[in-house]
Amino acid sequence: MIIDCHGHLVPPALLAEIAGRAGEFPSLRLAEGEGGFGFSFAGGKPTRPVAPPLKDTEKRRAWMAEHGIARQVVGGWLDMFGYELPPAEGIAWSRLINRHLAAAADRHFVPLATVPLQDGTAAAEMLDEVMAVGFPGVMIGTQPKGNGGVLDDPLLAPFWAMADRRRAVVFIHPVFESGDARVHEYGMANAVGRVTDTMIAVARLLFAGIPTRHPGARIVCAVGGAALPAILGRLRTNHALDPKLADPEANLRALWFDTIVQDAATLRFIAETVGAERLMMGSDHPFPIGDRAPRRIIAEAGFDAATQAAIEGETAMAVFGLGDATG
């Protein structure tokens, strides 16, 4: 079975319900834009409107069929996760999104839930809740306070403990605002900002020792590990200079990674660094910076047949608990 481990979906029924219930969220403002509406949370800058490809499941299925992809793991859209909302509103907002994502689950789409990451206890309780109704885990952003915050914040300890206990997938994904204004020109928010945002967020988890401390959690790092495999030597040296830090290499090797690096030699290097058994094919569909032909890079990397089969689906079956595979 060919599985795309990294996609995004916004069910149209979710948007329709939001339009009718927006007044129930005092800290939310809908921002009308060309082709739809975006979101302003707690007085923040409005997001982009929801792009049509995020909602169009018929075209998505056609694209999957064209590339021989049987199933796609889908999170929501990071821009609308609402980490800026007060916790009570964030809980209700996450439940609203999750209800529609759960309804979208079928033989093609495997949804990942969202949680109110602005509150570690609430996020843990929501994770427990969504695992109980059949989600394999969650997709989370790199900045749990909205435009800011860190994933190793001690206040998130209950969330990581629950992910460990529940053996939940935690798919770490960059947010739109990377935290560095220098990337907001030349298209670098996509080309560079997504990578640096993820790299910094996950590097903190490595030095904090969260992956090895919570081995039951199945932590997936987007964009091929966000250059962390390439700077492993520097991470090791930093650890040698301060042995109180957790071992970054052991923690890096405890993660899983998608294949969205758009370069076969780079993918091969990542496999050699962290182990090909930690790679899962991903597309980031429907975003243009993703990989619209995700099987090609795996073939071009020259893996043997067994490794290629694992990257294209067998590993994802185990990590996400699909079919008869276990992990």
Image: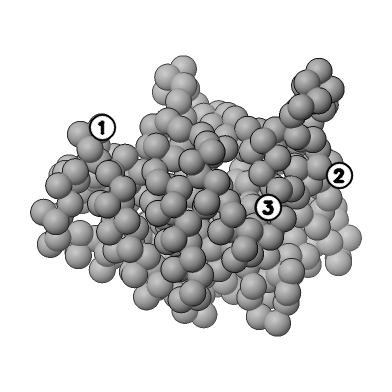
Q: Identify the residue at horizontal 71%, vertical 48% (top origin).
A: 213
Q: Residues within 10 Å of mark 3 (few under 14, many from 20)?
A: some
Task: Give the position of the C terminus as an image quadrant.
Answer: bottom right
Q: Is residue 184 above or below residue 116?
A: above
At horizontal 82% and vertical 53% (from top left) the residue drawn is: 276
* Residue denoted by label 3: 214
Taking 206 as reference, is 10 above or below it?
A: below
Name the N-terminal-most of marks 1 and 3: 1
Q: Which dot marks residue 45?
A: 1
Counting from the top left corner in percent of width and height, residue 135 is at 50, 70
Left or right: where does residue 16 sit relative to residue 189?
left
Q: Nearer the viewer, mark 3 or mark 2?
A: 3
Instruction: Identify the secondary structure beneath mark 1.
Output: loop
Kind of element beneath mark 3: loop
Instruction: Name the amino acid, label 1.
Output: Lys
* Residue 208 % position (x, y): 67, 35
Instruction: Please tell me which residue lies in front, 97 or 132.
Output: 132
The outermost residue toward the right is 304
- Asked whether 100 or 127 is in front, the reply is 127
- Quarter of the image with the N terminus is bottom right
What separation in Å lies between label 2 and label 1 (alpha carbons)? 41 Å
Amino acid under label 3?
His
Percent position of residue 191, x then y? 54, 32
x and y percentages locating residue 131 in the rendered image: 51, 70
Q: Are marks 2 and 1 in contact (CB under 8 Å)?
A: no
Q: State left or right for residue 267 relative to residue 217.
A: right
Locate residue 232 relative to residue 227 in the image: left or right. right
Q: Amino acid at mark 2?
A: Glu
Name the front one of labels 2 and 1: 1
Query: Does residue 185 show up?
Result: no
Q: Which mark is residue 264?
A: none
Q: Which residue is mark 2?
A: 272
